[in-house]
Image (spheres, coloured by chain):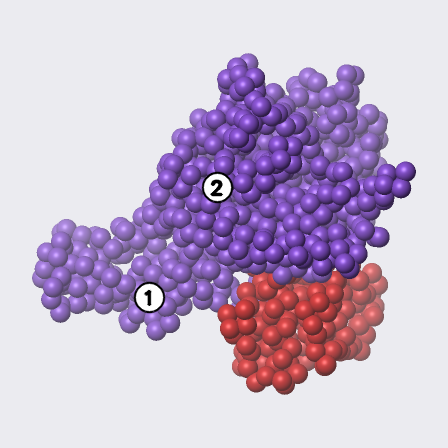
Amino acid sequence: MPQVTLTVNGKSHTVEVEARTLLVELLREKLRLTGTHVGCDTSQCGACVVQMNGDSVKSCTTLALQAEGATVTTIEGLAKADGTLHPMQEAFREYHALQCGFCTPGMVMSAIDLVEKHPQGLSEHEIREGLEGNLCRCTGYHNIVKAIGAAQEVMHGRSATLAPAHAAE
Amino acid sequence: MNAPVVFEGIGASPKRKEDLRFLSGRGNYTDDINRPDQTYAVMLRSPHAHAAIRGIDTAAAAAMPGVVAIYTGAEMVVGSLPCGWLIHNKDGSPMNEPGHPPLAQGKVRHVGDIVAVVIAETRPQARDAAEAIAVDYEVLGAATSMAAALAPGAPLLHEGAPGNVCYDWHIGDLAVNQAAFAQAKHVVHFELVNNRLIPNAMEPRAAIGDYDRTTDQHTLYTTSQNPHVIRLLMGAFVLQIPEHKLRVVAPDVGGGFGSKIFHYAEEAIVTWAAARINRPIKWTADRTESFMSDAHGRDHVTKAKLALAADGKFLGLHVSTTANMGAYLSTFATSVPTYLSATLLAGVYTTPTIYAEVKAVFTNTVPVDAYRGAGRPEATFLLERLVDIAAKQTGIDKLELRRRNFIPADAFPYQTPVALQYDSGDYQSTLAQALKTADWDGFEARRKAAAAQGKLRGIGISTYIEACGIAPSAVAGALGARAGLYEVGAIRVHPTGSVSVLTGTHSHGQGHETTLAQLVTDRFGIPLSQVDIVHGDTDRVPFGMGTYGSRSLAVGGSAMVKAMDKIVLKARRIAAHLMEASVDDVEFDRGTFRVAGTDKTKAWGEIALTAYVPHNYPIEEIEPGLDETAFYDPKNFTYPGGCHICEVEIDPDTGAIEVINFTAVDDVGRVINPMIVEGQVQGGIAQGIGQALLETCSYDADGQLLSGSFMDYTMPRADDVGTLSVATHETLCTHNPLGVKGCGEVGAIGSPPAVINAVVDALRDYGVTHVEMPATPAKLWHIINSGRQLAAE
């Protein structure tokens, strides 16, 4: 079986995979990083989104072998070693932007990439359009959009702390 | 222990206790669980809607790498997946109740019906082998629509269901109803389809069967909203496993919306097969399987007529519905169009006579069952569209027509003509608040401004009620339920005063770990961090009935209150002993026991410790420990209600439609956590907007599922749902100790008619009285375009 070597959340792994093994299968089944989820089989729902070489990718539509030499960050790799959450994680918690939690890892990973790629800032409309590749069945998106709007201020250094949810409304 | 500095009790919005693990990738969903020596199952599903199985050749597949076992209906001969609700026909005879074998027995009845299970060392190996099984099908004619299934000479799905009819049921006094119509000044007729939906919780269903031969112990990990119900149904009816030998675990579950209430074939298959091979077996649906095997929702075709007096007072309502059951009876399917829908046809109105009849029909489609709202959205959509149509026909303003017919706030308890007795509500107030928030009076100016931009703007309203907090066992039993519907709460106070709550309800997004803990914080005066909610494991939690019908707080929370009452009583007796006072003189308030009128106090932690270290203790009179269990059976359903207002804008050139504003004012009774209530309502509204504008399940005449993936079935995305204005207006439930009503389903119940009423309003110059859901751009464009042609001619 072919081998793939990649760095996941700062740790290097060399893993034997089948040629058809998907990146998400490698993460979930070989590395037991089960925070990345599979919600569909048509690359529509975004529950599987991870960051690979600085871009968000759908790990259900990426072959493990395509990740050769890649640097991958999953939801498990976002918080600091001391447990401090990434501003996007913190914003999702503050704004009640998750309910069942299943879409959440992919939603957070997509949101981080969306914000990072738009240093000039995103309007509510742009955030909604930017979430086109992620489905959530629980929240109605309302609080997800608010959370991303608040998180971008912290991520871009325009605000030192996250705006509290009720003050923002 | 001191009272918390930040108030975290009833009415506060602390951040959710469950969020940290979900945000860190540390959730524990069924597919995240791996058992030692685990194998993987793949279900071979029928590609045909209706076919006889002439033979199944598994020889080639069995010889493939990694294959451990293959089973078909020939090997797995077990009990039928049971239906939990018996409905009777008009003549009093019981419904037709054909069997539902987990693995097909000689015949398949819908695309997705399971023909064989392949178990292998890896999932890809199982999938490869499944493709190598040769099934000899004799394809039979399919009846996909209800009209096709009821037509003379239609293909027969089940020998035991002549004419493909499950039941022909009714409620109400037809003669009285006919007399009301004879008196009417106006009779308004309306026919509609309540579109079939596919629930699509984001986590696909999964199940792991595990078996220990040395103890004869079976374990099922499953994506369920109600693990005890699954244990009861599967253990007692399908596999004949006694309950002490069967553990069902529903860990973190990624959304349910009703679709994870039901006992599914795959659960029985992996449990049964794991014992055969003596190894754990994991099955996880891919989304394609979810589409063709999760129970679908809605799918009613209805004819209704409303009788009105000259002044607009409703005199009578007559409703005839055909309801699609799909190919087999799912767990609660039979109750949805009957006791969960027809009983809501009074709505918020004083209609004196209501007659409803429901014919339930088998078709070659996936079984249909409860989906968020379950019956109440269908009743609400019918009523709230009918009232708008009646307003137009009679020339009475749509708000005025509603107000004239509202049940007055001083008329509670209010007995409807369709069995239910509403305990409380204030429909004029929720209406007034919503009209103000939505700036109803300013709409005509907004319509004009939109028209100036070439857009068609419309506003729609819905004033609704629903019945939830399911349910009084005796009432449900009298109506055909085959189970009780109480709930359990077990409260364990630990020696140092922290608390574990064992609840029979199950959280799959609702935030019970926070809301239920707030009840304890509020009563015992301990911080939220000192309270953990345990759910989803039949080995840890006493027998409970699970989460559906917005029942967790109204029924499960009330059970907790009863258990906390017992604990407080016992703790006061211990405190009385320590303070050498009479128990009647010991008061308890949020963490402090006090001898009334004195400064003698004992803290919560001291009493807890004394209960477990009973050195100075009235051991002859009181047992050690501080651990109580209570079961609560509700006295009535709860009746949330409210008003939803939707404003839409349609681009006449493309048919594209946008929800501009959505306002909801809901009376869900006492609000425990406003943040969570808002989130529940927002999510429900998004699903309602989905039903109204985007979603529909589509089969072709041969029974092929056309909307079988997220490429084909339009789920609401972030740019389909605008900003949602959600508020509450409390009237308290009068019969449960918390005064709560339930908030899980109101969004999905109240919103679809508000959206379609807005669509029809936007199209008022185009001569339409109704637009079937979903009101897609294509449908709207055709309406507008044909209207333009009419105008041109």
User: What residue do we see at 69% from left, 33% from top?
Assistant: B192
Residue B704 visible, this orientation? yes
The image's mark for residue B390 is none
Residue A110's place in the image compared with B102, above or below, is: below
Residue B140's place in the image compared with A100, above or below, is: above
**In the shown orientation, is residue A41 left or right of residue B267?**
right
Picture quadrant where residue A143 is located: bottom right
How far from the left and from the top, in percent, is residue B285?
A: 70, 49
Which quarter of the rendering shows the C terminus of chain A?
Answer: bottom right
Residue B547's place in the image compared with B358, above or below, is: below
Tell me which label, 1 or 2, sits earlier in the chain. Answer: 2
**In the shown orientation, is residue A42 left or right of residue B513?**
right
Q: Which residue is mark 2?
A: B468
User: What residue do we see at 81% from left, 51% from top?
Assistant: B652
Amino acid under disc 1: Ile
User: Among the chains, which one is purple?
Assistant: B
Viewer-side residue, A82 vs B687 = B687
User: Among the chains, which one is red?
Assistant: A
Pointers 1 and 2 in contact (C-beta within 8 Å): no
Picture quadrant where residue B410 is located: top left
Q: Pinpoint the chain carrying mark 2.
A: B
Viewer-side residue, B183 vs B152 = B183
Q: Pinpoint the chain carrying mark 1.
A: B
| Whole-number angstrom distance, CA of label 1 to CA of label 2 | 31 Å
Which quarter of the rendering shows the N terminus of chain A?
Answer: bottom right
Amino acid under disc 2: Cys
User: What residue do we see at 54% from left, 40% from top?
Assistant: B400
Picture quadrant where residue A29 is located: bottom right
How far from the left and from the top, in percent, is residue A103?
A: 65, 61
Q: Secondary structure at mark 1?
A: loop
Q: Which residue is mark 1?
A: B526
